[in-house]
Image (tube, grey):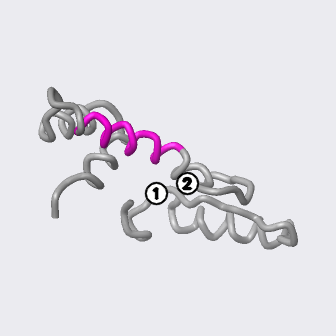
């Protein structure tokens, strides 16, 4: 994922004891920083990672198949959708 200053999304995960005032302050702060917010319950992976990880797994499975080439996989990921572009970045060699 991108560094925090670059990310456009902030996932807001209120805890069981989070007050409405704290939640509203957090939402206002994120908005003042130009961020888009997504609210989620406190669950494993929240939202973004729950969506991203299956894509990463499928990309790795595809690379294991003989007829899939790394470059082709990256091109498809980047041109397919924004989430897939993250997969290409995560899989690219250092």
Of residues 5 and 40, the one nearer the viewer is 40
Residue 15's spot in the image, x, y percent?
Answer: 79, 67
The residue positioned 18% from the left and 35% from the top of the image is 75
Quarter of the image that includes the N terminus:
bottom left
Please indicate whether residue 84 sits to the left or right of residue 13 in the image. Answer: left
**In the rendered image, the vertical position of residue 73 relative to residue 7, given as above or below:** above
What label sits on residue 8 in the rendered view?
A: 1
The span from disc 1 to disc 2 (Cα, nearest Å) is 6 Å
Q: Secondary structure at mark 1?
A: loop
The residue positioned 16% from the left and 58% from the top of the image is 93
Residue 71's spot in the image, x, y percent?
Answer: 12, 39
* Residue position marked by numbered label 2 in the rendering: 36
Q: Reading the chain from its start, which is encountered first: label 1 or label 2?
A: 1
**In the rendered image, the vertical position of residue 7 relative to residue 26, given as above or below:** above
CB atoms of marks 1 and 2 within 8 Å: yes
Of residues 23 and 74, the one nearer the viewer is 74
Residue 76's spot in the image, x, y percent?
Answer: 23, 32
The residue positioned 27% from the left and 37% from the top of the image is 77
Q: Which residues are magenta?
A: 51-63
**In the rendered image, the vertical position of residue 19 relative to residue 45, given as above or below:** below
What label sits on residue 37 in the rendered view?
A: none
Q: Secondary structure at mark 2?
A: strand
Magenta stretch contains residue 18: no
Q: Residue lying furthest top in this view?
A: 67
């Amino acid at each position: 994922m991108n560094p925090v200053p670059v990310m456009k999304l902030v996932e807001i995960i209120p805890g069981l004891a989070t007050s409405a005032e704290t939640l509203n302050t957090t939402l206002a702060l994120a908005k003042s920083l130009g961020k888009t917010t997504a609210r989620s319950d406190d669950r494993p992976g929240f939202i973004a990672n729950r969506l991203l990880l299956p894509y990463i797994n499928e990309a790795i499975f595809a690379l294991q198949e003989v007829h899939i080439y790394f470059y082709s996989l990256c091109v498809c990921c980047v041109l397919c959708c924004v989430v897939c572009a993250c997969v290409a970045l995560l899989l690219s060699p250092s």
